[in-house]
Every structure is written in structure tokens, then in C-alpha cells.
Image: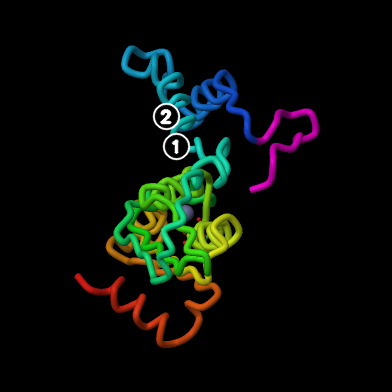
Amino acid sequence: MTDPVTLDGEGTIGEFDEKRAENAVRELLIAVGEDPDREGLRETPARVARAYQEIFAGLRQQPEDVLTTTFDLGHDEMVLVKDIEVLSSCEHHLVPFVGVAHVGYIPSVDGKITGLSKLARLVDVYARRPQVQERLTTQIADSLMKILEPRGVIVVIECEHMCMTMRGVRKPGAKTITSAVRGQLRDSATRNEAMSLIMAR
Ligand SMILES: Nc1nc2c(ncn2[C@@H]2O[C@H](COP(=O)(O)OP(=O)(O)OP(=O)(O)O)[C@@H](O)[C@H]2O)c(=O)[nH]1
Ligand SMILES: [Zn+2]
């Protein structure tokens, strides 16, 4: 994600336009044959606009905003946080894809590590955007490499896509697994160690 850029005078990527979102939801309700002025729907455009502001909050965040805390512990072995909940939105259909992320890294030679919660926050920065799972996976890996300068990174994500469940092909339960491996974690022994930790239940 780059810094905000202008969209031909149509608005700015990165800013949330609540009024515009409300109008769009109202239009959508009309388009599907609903009456947006009936009692139960009257507040819906405003609610959905607020919900989208939250769901896409990652568009207004950068990885540097969350990977703030670093310690020099001199720890030079793998750190892995697994089963981090992923709640993201498929950019093709704007419906959720949900599952878990496993994020591991081998700290830099000088042992620079980050707080464990920051890895989960990093997942959210990229998950809370219109996404595809492959890009989500590589963005997490690449931003960790850039900011923490670790010797290696592994990111594995397992998700179920609602666009494959509630519509279209309708295959509930199908899981998509993506991975991104960088640096020393590409070595087969280290990678196998990480994968066995990830797969252990
Ligand atoms: N690679 C990838 N594909 C995704 C992801 N999320 C959704 N898709 C797929 O994006 C594709 C979009 O295909 P299209 O043919 O343009 O759209 P569609 O007619 O709605 O496709 P169907 O879902 O097959 O009905 C579908 O095959 C989705 O399953 C993702 O994270 N990664
Ligand atoms: Zn989709």
C-alpha cells in the first residue's frame, strides 16, 4: 500500500468518506429492490458506513504504525505466533474471508525482536483492506523483512472465503492455504521446523 494518492478528483484513497458510503448503501438497497425508508432500514446506511470504516481501517494504517516496539534481547532463535485470527474482505466480492495466520521470524543478528502482539496487529493492518489472500500473505512477510530486518520470515495463512461459501461455487469448508517464506527460513531444515510447529495441534 502506497501513501494516499488522488483519484482524478474523485476523492482520495486513504480517506474515509462517510456520507458517500451512506449514499452508496442507500443506492444498493434500492438496487436490490428494498425500501431504504422503511423503519428497519432507516439507520442501515449510516450503520453500514460506520462498519465499513472499521472493516477497512487498515487503508489508513501503515505497518510502521504498529511495529513500533522493538527490543534488543539478543535472542537469535525463531519466534512464531500461530493461530492469529484473520478477518479480511475479498476484494472481488467484498465479502469476508476468515481464518488464521501463523507468523514467524528469526531475529536479526543483533537480536532485534518486536512485541508478540505487534505481529497480530500487523496482520490486522493488511487484513482490514480489500484483499486477496496471496497479497495479504506477502505484504505481512515483506513488511516484517523491511522493518525488523530479521534473518528470515515465514507467514502461513489458512482461510475460508465466503465468496466460495455463500454464493458462486458454494463450497463451504474449502480452505485456501498461502505461504510466504523469506531469508533463512527458505532453508529446508529451518522451514521444516517452522512448518512442524505450525501444523502441530
Ligand atoms: N487467487 C485468489 N482468488 C480469489 C480470492 N478471493 C476470491 N477469489 C476468486 O476470485 C475469482 C473472481 O472470479 P470472476 O470469474 O471474476 O468472478 P465470479 O464470476 O464472481 O467467480 P465465481 O466466484 O467463480 O462465481 C473467483 O474465482 C474467486 O474464488 C483470493 O484471495 N485469491
Ligand atoms: Zn470473493
* Relative horizontal placement of residue 1, taking residue 201 as reference (left or right): right
Please state the horizontal and vertical placement of residue 165, each as a whole percent of the image: 34, 56
Disc 1 and disc 2 in contact, CB within 8 angstroms: yes
Secondary structure under badge 2? helix
In this view of the protein, which residue sits in the foreground, 187 or 87?
A: 187
- Which numbered circle lies on residue 142? none
Q: Is residue 26 magenta?
A: no
Quick check: 121 left or right of 186?
A: left
Task: Kindly identify which residue carries mark 1.
Answer: 55
* Amino acid at the residue labelled 2: Ala
Q: Main secondary structure of the magenta part?
A: loop
The residue carrying mark 2 has its beta carbon less than 8 Å from ligand 2: no
Q: Secondary structure at mark 1?
A: helix
Foreground residue among 158 and 164: 158
The residue depicted at 37 percent of the width and 59 percent of the height is 101
Q: Is residue 116 visible?
A: yes
Mark 2, residue position: 51
Residue that appears at 29% across and 78% down: 196
Instruction: Categorize mark 2 by other alpha carbons within 10 Å: few (<14), some (14-19), many (20+).
Output: few
Seen in the image, is 193 located left or right of residue 61?
left
What residue sits 57% from the left and 62% below the top?
149
Front residue of 109 and 151: 109
Q: Which residues are magenta?
A: 1-13
